[in-house]
């Protein structure tokens, strides 16, 4: 993570009274500075997919977890209902958000399952989460940066959709496999 995000996390922990319990570390996820099997749990969301060497990143996350420990990995779903992958390709080609985005890989349910099993996880369960479409987050980011008046209108229009998505995410359904992201939970 970036230095500014790490500093922000430290400040937030301090403000909330947790600074003595947690120590954020800025490091490269591909080469974690920890011994093998030193954590009971490892959890990542919104990070592995931004690393071109994502296989090495997954292997590192699993390496630092003790035998019998739990690994949780959240990544973008290539088959999500909002066609996120295809929108990313379009946005990249048109260079619409070049200053605000970076590398991002998308996974299928099978690919994510195969990769984490290959790197040593057992009892793997794959599910979906986050039904809110990324394109709306892009529009939100763009309007905040370029047009405050349009952003207010956009916010009013999007509120009903947010409510619907929140209700859908809280239900166990096959539709979750079409969600924005996939989550793998497994035991080392």
Image (cartoon, rainbow, N blue to C red):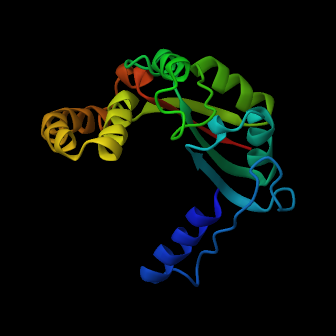
Q: Is residue 5 above or below residue 153?
A: below
Q: Nearer the viewer, residue 74 or 27?
A: 27
Q: Nearer the viewer, residue 72 or 172?
A: 72
Percent coordinates x, y for residue 123 in the rendering: 65, 34
- Pick the quarter of the image with the N terminus: bottom right
Residue at horizontal 63%, vertical 35%?
49
Q: Nearer the viewer, residue 48 or 93?
A: 93
Residue at horizontal 44%, vertical 22%?
177
Percent coordinates x, y for residue 147 in the rendering: 25, 42
Q: Is residue 8 above or below residue 187?
A: below
Q: Nearer the viewer, residue 110 or 87?
A: 87
Whether residue 175 sits left or right of residue 70 in the image: it is left
State how many labels appear: 0
Whether residue 148 sits left or right of residue 61 in the image: it is left
Whether residue 74 sits left or right of residue 131 in the image: it is right
Q: Is residue 188 above or below residue 128?
A: below
Question: Which of the 4 image quarters holds residue 139?
Answer: top left
Percent coordinates x, y for residue 160 in the rendering: 14, 35
Residue at horizontal 64%, vertical 58%?
2
Percent coordinates x, y for residue 188 in the rendering: 74, 44
Q: Residue furthest right?
A: 35
Whether residue 163 sits left or right of residue 54 in the image: it is left
Q: Is residue 17 above or below residue 70?
A: below
Question: Which of the 4 image quarters holds residue 133?
Answer: top left
């Amino acid at each position: 993570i970036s230095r500014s995000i790490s500093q922000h996390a430290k400040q937030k922990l301090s403000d909330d009274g947790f600074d003595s319990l947690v120590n954020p570390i800025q490091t490269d996820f591909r080469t974690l500075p920890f011994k093998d099997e030193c954590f009971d749990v490892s959890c990542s969301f919104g990070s592995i997919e931004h690393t071109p060497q994502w296989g090495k990143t997954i292997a590192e996350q699993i390496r630092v977890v003790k035998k019998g420990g739990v690994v949780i990995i959240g990544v973008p779903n290539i088959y999500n209902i909002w066609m996120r992958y295809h929108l990313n390709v379009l946005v990249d080609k048109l260079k619409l958000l070049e200053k605000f985005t970076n590398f991002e890989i998308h996974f299928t349910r099978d690919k994510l399952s195969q990769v984490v099993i290959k790197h040593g996880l057992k009892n793997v369960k794959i599910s979906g989460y986050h039904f809110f479409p990324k394109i709306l987050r892009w529009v939100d980011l763009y309007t905040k940066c370029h047009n405050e008046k349009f952003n207010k209108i956009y916010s009013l229009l999007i509120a009903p959709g947010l409510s619907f998505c929140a209700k859908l995410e809280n239900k166990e359904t096959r539709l979750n496999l079409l969600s924005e992201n996939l989550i793998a939970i497994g035991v080392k």
